[in-house]
Amino acid sequence: MTISPWIFALLEVAGAALAFLVGWVAHRKIGEGKVFNSEQLAAKIVREAEREAENLKKSAVLEAKDEWFREKTKLDKEVQSQKQEVQRNERKLQELEMNLNRRAEVNEKKERDQKRLERELEVKSESLAERDVELQRVLIEQNSRLQRISGMTADEARQQLIANMEHEAKVEAAKRLQEIREDLHRNADKEAREIITLAIQRTAADHSAESTVAVVHLPSDEMKGRIIGREGRNIRAFETATGIDVIIDDTPEAVILSGFDPIRREVAKRSLTRLVTDGRIHPARIEEIVAKVQKEVETQIVELGEAAILEVGVHGMHPEIVKLLGRLQYRTSYGQNILQHSKEVAWICGVMAGQLGFDTQLAKRCGLLHDLGKALTHEVEGAHAQISMEMALKYGEPDIVVKAVGYHHHDPTAENLYAVLVMAADAISGARPGARRESIENYVKRLEALEKIANSFPGVERSFAIQAGREVRIMVEPKVVDDARAYQLANDVARRVERELQYPGQIKVVVIRETRAMEYAK
């Protein structure tokens, strides 16, 4: 007999229900003792859950508020930035508008000025035309009066003027001829020029000029305060020990030492450099360093003198002369180092003496000692040539050397040809391009005097001295000075410059006359 599936299903359900019932009854019997504890635990869990939920709720609310505040702040910043950008754009637009208004005003003003100038130009043109007619009339009247007064016709007066100009031209030609003859006479002494040229070429030397101030570089500007010291004690001690003024200004990382004595200035420069490097700057240390450096400089002066004597090739000089020669290293004349200049003069004297058959050693000795007095010019009264002669005589130099040294700036006696050599060599060394510098005051005065002479003539509009005073260019008014008068003006200026100014070489006078014709096409 076949049992239906539905019956099996009902039996399984009934079995499961019976099992559940049995389990429930058993569980109930087992859990009746724990019901009370379970209810308390459940109540506690519920309370904790409620508190946790409340805390989570509060936390979520706070986070939401923070997020809202951040978004609001961000939005406010964006709005503010946009407002500022709008304001900047508005200001730019206002500035552009103002600039446009100003440009429009300027353009209107220029147009008004241009129209005014055009009207003034028309009036001046008409006035000039009238003045030209009047000038022609007056000129005719003046010519007639001149003919009546002088008893000469215009042609006769023109012939007289031409004759005068021819006479002046002949005088100028004669002077030029004399200059040419003098040039030929100078060129005739070809052998002497060859000797001098050979001496210059064989004794070419570098030149360095010492300045009147010394600059000491510092590692930092803080070092300036240490140099000054508390209440200026360090700088006063330094100036007292060296005799040199210390200038502390706004120059970055540098201190200037100023003084007329170059040896003292050298001592001060070396001392300050050592103090800055050492870092210990106080009055006692300053006195110690300055004393050491002074001894070193004195030793170096002797070494420089001995080196100069050895380099030139003369020997047997007194130790005091050696010391004086070393001091010349720190002396300058028109920017030229005196020791270097003395060695150049000695070499040139030696070369020229060898070419002429004289004693080269004696000539070098005269040339080396010719400026010896410049080492003492601020300590002993008198000209340096006289002091040099006294020093040479005092320390046992030969009589011919004494006279050559003393007379090298004067007309030497005929019997002392070495003085002639020293004079020539001294002029050659000083005339070398770049060796010496002219005083700026004298240079400016010469240029001003040259322009003043040119400007004093009638019809001169302005003048310019150019080419270091070797040329003057004169701008004249074309309505006052015509072409013929321009040539005469150049000659007059040149003659006056010859009479009133002292200058080397020659000065070129150029007169420039310019006429411009201008008209507007309308």
Image (spheres, rainbow, N blue to C red):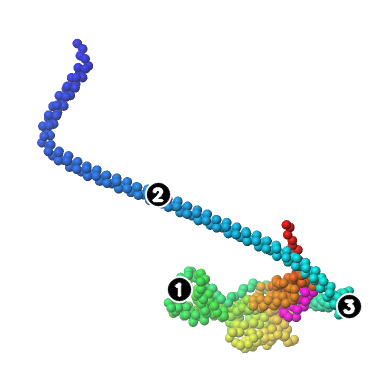
Q: Is residue 494 magenta?
A: yes
Distance between mark 1 and mark 2 Cα atoms: 55 Å
Distance between mark 2 and mark 3 Cα atoms: 106 Å
Distance between mark 3 and mark 1 Cα atoms: 88 Å
Dot 2 falls on a residue whose secondary structure is helix
**Residue designated by label 1:** 225
Of pointers 1 and 2, the one earlier in the residue sequence: 2
**Residue designated by label 3:** 152
**Residue designated by label 2:** 75
Amino acid at dot 1: Gly
Point out the stretch of residues depicted in magenta.
486-506
- The crowding category of the residue bearing disc 1, from other C-alpha atoms within 10 Å (few below 14, some 14 to 19, many at least 20), is few
* Residue 167 at x, y percent in the picture: 85, 78
Amino acid at dot 3: Met
Amino acid at dot 2: Leu
Of pointers 3 and 1, the one earlier in the residue sequence: 3
